[in-house]
Image (cartoon, rainbow, N blue to C red):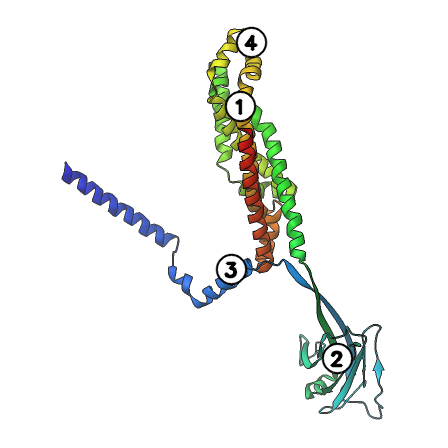
Amino acid sequence: MYRHRRWLQIIGALLALGIYAGSWHVVGIDLRKLVEPQAARRAQEIFTAFLTPEILVPERGIQRVEVPVRVPCESGNIPETAEVGEGPRLFLPPCASPGTQIRIRGEGFRPGSELVLRWVFAPSPQLPLGGELLAGRTRTDAAGHFELDVEIRPLLAQEGGARLQAEARWEGRWQISPALTRTMELTLQTIFLALMATTLATGVAAPLSFLAARNITARGPVGTAVYYLTRTIFNVVRSIEPLVVAAIFATWVGFGPFAGVLALTVATVVNLGKLFSEVIETIDPGPVEAITATGANTLQVIRYAVIPQITLPFLAFIIYHWDINVRISTVVGFVGGGGIGYQLKLWIDQTDYHKAGTAVWAIIAVVSAMDYVSARLRETIR
């Protein structure tokens, strides 16, 4: 007997080992990929960005102006100083010869800003897609002026000239990041999304939970059939992931928070319905029997014997599920359910990991706060 059990244990261990080996192969686990230099650099970049969310950013500005320059000068042409545009202005000869230098003068730019001069080429047979060529760098003075000598490259003669572009960039005082502002707006939307879904679901789940409670409904053939039908519906709908439901509603009513509310409402109805029904099934039967003995009907029994016993547990489950829905709504947003989740997905797709980090930290803060508040509320109503 002992030897027989020993062989069964060995066979079971070998079978489990084979299952795990097959699973390892099927899912393609390759631990070497975790330490590949390129993968490690990408992971470091992403984690660093997530740990340094975009909270404050410097105020940024840009000024740009362009002037055409012919190369070489036409026969008999006398170069003249040209002034172009309003605001930032450039002064330079309208043409030049290859290999020479021309003096560029600028006015009206932001004082003390970095300034880049570049040649901008239009598409041509030599440059089908056009292009740019750096001409020089400088900085404007306290009055917004600059002067710079620029060499006329041979490429300019091949193209017959180009447009000289002057671009000034600067950074000002620090200000709240637009990503943070957007995150706060969508985080608030996420909280209200979860609140509306929980409220709507409670209104539907509360009456349905009585139909799914054996001690209330399962009396007689009809009541038993209703009980099993309601329980079956709860189990079937609960087996469908909220992500799938959200994708369906996003296709039905369009992307946005309304689709998220509908998806979370469906998921919350069946979850709360099941929890509520189990609370009803565990009530003290004494008050129910006492009220029934007086000749009260089913509605009166529920009103005076059941509801007083289930009010506080119901409130605790409602508050707890609001907390859960705040977390789920973030994931539902990935498939178009609105809220912060959808914006987080967009930032990740666009590799704006610093902005995505802002959203992640906001989600962590909200979930932590909701967990604390819901726990205190549940303690209060007990």
Q: Amino acid at mark 1?
A: Ile
Look at mark 3 in the image and give the residue it sits on: 47
- Asked whether residue 268 appears in the rendered view, the answer is no
Secondary structure at numbered mark 2: strand
Q: Nearer the viewer, residue 379 or 39?
A: 379
**Residue 146 location (% of width, % of height):** 77, 81
Whichever of labels 2 and 4 marks the residue nearer the N terminus, that label is 2
Q: Nearer the viewer, residue 12 or 35?
A: 35
**Residue 28 location (% of width, % of height):** 39, 56
Look at mark 1 in the image and give the residue it sits on: 310
Return the residue found at the far top. Answer: 294
The crowd level at tag 3 (other Cα within 10 Å; few <14, some 14-19, many 20+) is some
Cα–Cα span, label 4 and label 1:
19 Å
Rendered-image quadrant of the N terminus: top left
Whichever of labels 4 and 3 marks the residue nearer the N terminus, that label is 3
**Residue 210 location (% of width, % of height):** 53, 22
Q: Are marks 2 and 1 in contact (CB under 8 Å)?
A: no
Look at mark 2 in the image and give the residue it sits on: 164
